[in-house]
Image (cartoon, helix red, strand yellow):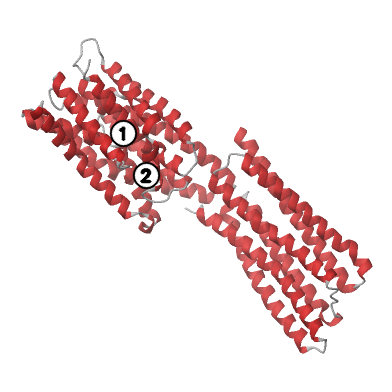
Amino acid sequence: MFFANKQKKIETQIAQYNEQISTCLDKFRQAIGQYCKNPDRDAIKSRFDDVHKSESLADDIRRDIEVMMYSKSLFPESRGDILGLLEAMDKVPNQTEAVVHMIWNQRISIPKELSSEVLGLVEVCCRCVEALLEAAGKLFTNFTNATVAVGKIDELESEADRVEAAIIEKIFSGQMDSIDKILLRDMVKSISAISDRAENAGDRIRITVAKRSV
Amino acid sequence: MLPLTGGLYLGWALGANDAANVFGTAVASRIITFRKAGILCSVSIILGAMLQGTAGIHTLSGLTEQTARTLIIVSVSAAFTVTLMTMKSLPISTSQAIVGAIAGLGLATDNMHWAGLIKVIACWIATPIGAMFFSCIIYKLLSVLIKYIPMSILTRDKILWGGLLVVGTYGSYALGANNVANATGIFSGQFAGVSDGQLALFGGIAIAIGVLTYSKRIMMTVGSGIMPLDAFTAFTAVASMAVTVHIFAVIGVPVSTSQAIVGSIIGIGLIRGTHAIKFGVLRNIMIGWLLTPVISLILAAAGYAIL
């Protein structure tokens, strides 16, 4: 009974963490969508702040889980695996925040002719993170099936790489200033890095399942 | 009653060496602390010795005739052999040590009951093979359950944690029931007013003291030395060892928990792939198994000649 309560607490907290990452992702999607439509700095400020707040909340939940994991008597192996996964997952909301900071601080404007491609890239990256959240959720409901969702992460990460390469090619084939091209390229790479972070966390899940495979 | 101190020493050595076979995998994989494992193991050993330990005592007491002098020689020779191997961190067989010593004395005095000895040796050979067989069956059955029943990784941990406690307790019970004869079997019928039940209790307590005071190092060798074990494989290994040893306890032949657990781990290694098995460690363990009866046989024969 004691063990069951502890397990329930950990699983609830991890579900909350996943939900918070999902919220952060939605805020990020909305912020970039809004910015592509209307690149007005004043109008977009609150959207970017929302991303930052969501990321901070996710951090708070993660820290709570880490403290709880050390105070609860889990198998050392499982504790290490779960903490490693949380650390890897934490890099996803961090990266969304890094993208909005980059856009804000470097005053990057997204040309109209590139906005649909950039939004497409954002969408692929967000779907990739959603697949990660699905896989992470499976670890705590039906862990042997988690690798199916991890397969989806890999596919979406590859798609993100393809979209990223196409956008960068388009940027450098245009007539913009070189400095604008470089800024845009860095921004696109930074957006694409969200899917790379998701893939890294997915690899953690794959290893966690493989260690328990019989 | 002085010869019984030899039994106490042997029981202590047995506990120090053989508790590793029951809780070594769980302790080495940090699933259970050594302190908790030691207490649980000790209590279960005493219970096993008291409730089902007398069958093995009858078998060992029938191998050869004993006097007060030979009792001391046998028990001290066996205990010394086990201590020597324990200091080398080798999980050897206490059954082999005591039977080797009895055989040495039997040869020296030309008073050996060969039929009983052959039965015991046959059971030694059957022990690792039987444990290997059971570990393959248990592994396959459990892997099907884990594959097809949806569960959280934490639920899996919970089940294995509880399972390890249960099989560890059962294994300790089987260890007490089967191996108490190694500690005090030779004293059966030697002292007026001391029943086999009392000998079983005495031996059980001696084994428990060995567990609590000197078993940690061997636990680490058994738990992580042959191949890396996780909670699932640890559970499988201990469960198959416990079943095997308990069967022999019921038959009334003291066998080696060391050989049973090593057989179990090899069985798992065969299913998972032999690349995981550390053959160097396995070779040393095998050498220990071969040397144990030989050393105790020589010590007992030499002890008889000198004393």
State the image coordinates of residue B194 (x, y, percent, origin top left): 25, 13
Q: Nearer the viewer, mark 1 or mark 2?
A: 2
Q: Amino acid at mark 1?
A: Ile
Q: Amino acid at mark 2?
A: Thr
* Mark 1–mark 2 distance (CA, rounded to whole Å): 25 Å
Q: Nearer the viewer, residue B96 or B294?
A: B294
State the image coordinates of residue B177 (x, y, percent, origin top left): 32, 27
Q: Nearer the viewer, residue B76 or A60?
A: B76
Residue B169: which quarter of the image? top left
- Location of residue B65 with respect to A16 vertically, above or below: above
Q: Residue visible at 47% across and 48% down?
A: B230
The label on residue B221 is 2
State the image coordinates of residue B219 (x, y, percent, origin top left): 39, 40
The secondary structure type at the circle numbered 1 is helix
Q: Residues within 10 Å of mark 2 (few under 14, many from 20)?
A: many
Q: Residue visible at 67% across and 75% down?
A: A161
Q: Nearer the viewer, residue B106 or B251?
A: B106
Q: Residues within 10 Å of mark 1 (few under 14, many from 20)?
A: some
Q: Is residue B51 left or right of residue A144?
A: left
Residue on which the image places disc 1 = B247
Subunit bearing disc 2: B
Subunit bearing disc 1: B
Reading the chain from its start, which is encountered first: label 1 or label 2?
Answer: 2
Quadrant housing the N terminus of chain A? top right
Residue A1 at least partly seen = no
Q: Is residue B222 left or right of residue A134?
A: left
Q: Nearer the viewer, residue A163 or B31?
A: B31
